[in-house]
Amino acid sequence: MKPFFSIIIPLFNASSKLPQLLESVSLQRCRNFEVVFMDGASTDNTLDIVADFVKNNKKQPVIVHSSPDHGIYDAMNRGVDWASGEWLYFMGSDDSFCDAGVLEEVKDVLEREKADLIYGNVVGISGTTRYVYNTEDKVLSKGIHHQSVFYRHSLFDDFGKYDLKFPVAADYDFTLKVFLNDSYRIRYINRDIAYYGESGFSSVNFDYKFFCGHYRLLKCNKALDRIADPDKCLSDSVYCCYHLAGTKKNLALAWRNLLFYVFFVKKATLNFRIKVFYNMLKRTVRRPLLT
């Protein structure tokens, strides 16, 4: 019988933070889940800690795979391939469930209501910042932590896996694809799901490649009227194009999106178009910025 949940955990030299995560997993009252560890060939004692977890949770289905990977999203994609659960949930080694009832409550909701994606809130590991995603505008315009989201496994058949060209926001890119497709049922519960590690890669880096096309993605999916401040979204996307041009990284992508904003945003004034094009050209020909 397939497990209800697959908890996919990408790992690499995570021994210092992993025990707290595994304790929160072990304490879950709902036991209808498997754990899928995708290790990127750690050189510390990460796999020893995982082995202890397996030993102490003999009745829990566990998959452990260790080999070099191409980063966290590559590991998560491999986890999708190994997972057999109906619902997939992704945790970083420095994350943890908020309490022992998380999986139990989410499962109860899913057994009562039809959904393809269900999500709640997350709290920074320090406990000082709580992210409440109770409006569509927040998700579409500002992003969403993947630790708040449970995905029906079949979504990865429909949309493919995480796009590795986005090093920081591939999870947000995937989640937006679901939100922007009205064929899928999305359910929000006002419930804290996880404490997320604020020192993780996605917390201390920004994905200029994804966000330079953020406004374009929303516009092409006719979703600009679903966010409160589309002008800010446009401004932010243009800024990301400037940044990529200034660093001389992903210039082709930056220019494709910038030209879209110049020629295909109907409400843009002629002055805006000239200014944006000139600023982009100026950043392109300058010496690259240090990043």
Image (cartoon, rainbow, N blue to C red):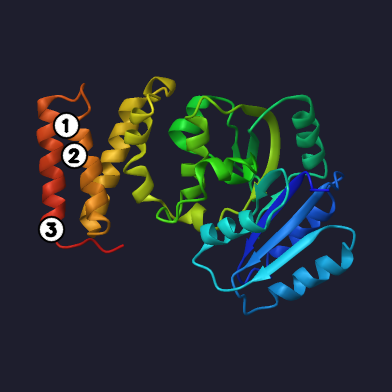
Look at 62% across and 80% down and name the residue there.
Answer: 43
The picture places residue 109, in percent across and down from the top left corner, at 76, 29
166 left or right, relative to 103: left
15 left or right, relative to 31: left
Look at 78% across and 36% down and name the residue there.
Answer: 107
Please identify, in this view, whether the residue under mark 3 or under mark 1 is nearer the observer: 1
Looking at the figure, which quarter contains the C terminus? bottom left
Marks 3 and 1 close (CB-CB < 8 Å): no
Q: Is residue 200 above or below residue 160?
A: below
Q: Which residue is mark 2?
A: 259
Q: Is residue 51 above or below residue 19?
A: below
Is 211 in front, or is 86? 86
The picture places residue 62, in percent across and down from the top left corner, at 78, 61
The CA span between labels 1 and 2 is 6 Å
231 left or right, relative to 207: left
Label of residue 282 in the image: none
Can the viewer see residue 277 in this picture?
yes
Is 166 in front, or is 1? 1
Q: Amino acid at mark 2?
A: Leu
Is 183 in front, or is 171? 183
Q: Which residue is mark 1?
A: 263
Q: Is residue 62 above or below residue 100?
A: below
Q: Which residue is mark 3?
A: 286
The CA span between labels 2 and 3 is 19 Å
Please identify, in this view, whether the residue under mark 2 or under mark 3 is nearer the observer: 2
The CA span between labels 3 and 1 is 24 Å
